[in-house]
Image: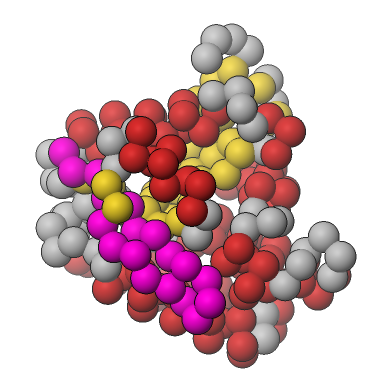
Amino acid sequence: MTAPYRTAKLTKNDKPLFVGLMSRAFARDPLFLYIFGDSEVDRKANSRMTAFLSFIFDSSFMLHEEIVGVFEHERLLGAYVVEKPSASKLMNVIGGLLLIGRLVPLLFRISSPPLGLLNAYMRITRSAAPSVPHHYLIMIGVEPEAQGKGIGGTLLLHLLHAANADQLSQGILLDTENKENVAWYRKNGFLLHRETQLHDVPVYCMLYRK
C-alpha cells in the first residue's frame, strides 16, 4: 500500500470511527447475526451490536490489548484488536477490576440471551487456545467498500511483524466463522488449529506459530 494510506494505533478519540467501521464490517458476520440479530433492519440489534463494539474499544485501553488501524487521510478503512501476551499478572488484575465498571452499562443495553451466547463463545474459543504465551486476534475488519484493496492484508502483516518481534509471544490465535476466510488465513501462514461450533454457527480456530 502507498500514500495516502497510513497504519497507526488508535487513540481514545478514534472510538466513533472504530464503532462505525466495525458495525459495517461485521453487519453480515454469521456470529454477529446469530448473537445480536440483523443490525441492518433491526434497531435493537443495531443498538446491541454498537454497545458491544463500544465495550470492546473501551476495554482495550484497560486490558493488555491494542487497536491498530489503516487510515486514508482521516478516514478509518480497517482495524484490528489484539490481546498481547502479558508478563505482568498485576496488570491483568488491575485491568480486570477497571473493566467491571464498563460491564454495568453494557448489561442495560444487551439482554441476557446475547450475553450468554457471548460467554459461551468465549469459553469455546479460549478452550482451543495453546498453553504457551501468544497474541489473540480479537477482531479484524475492513470497510465493506474498501475491501479488495489490500487493507486486510496490510493489517495482518502488521500484526505478524508485531508478534514475531515480541520475544514473549509464540504466535497468534484467531477465530473466524466465515469458512471462506480459512483459505486466506492459511495463505498468510496460519493453520487450522481446531474446528468447533457455537450451536449452529461453525467456528474455525486458526493458529500462526513463530
Q: Most extreme residue toward the top, as rendered?
A: 3
**What residue is shown at x 59% (from left), y 10% (from top)?**
3
Q: Most extreme residue toward the bottom, as rendered?
A: 112
**What residue is shown at x 53% (from left), y 86% (from top)?**
116
In front: 97, or 162?
A: 162
**What residue is shown at x 48% (from left), y 46% (from top)?**
181
Q: Is residue 162 above or below residue 126?
A: above
Q: Quadrant of residue 31?
A: bottom right
What segment carries the magenta color? 193-210
Instruction: Check residue 206 for magenta coloring.
Output: yes
Residue 114 percent across, percent down from the top left: 61, 81
Residue 150 percent across, percent down from the top left: 54, 24
Color theme of the render? secondary structure
In front: 18, or 28?
A: 28
Residue 54 in sight in this render? yes
Instruction: Check residue 47 for magenta coloring.
Output: no
Residue 62 percent across, percent down from the top left: 43, 60
Q: Is residue 119 left or right of residue 91?
A: right
Q: Quadrant of residue 32?
A: bottom right
Picture quarter with the C terminus: top left
In front: 33, or 72?
A: 33
Q: Is residue 168 above or below residue 165?
A: below
Q: Is residue 92 left or right of residue 53?
A: left
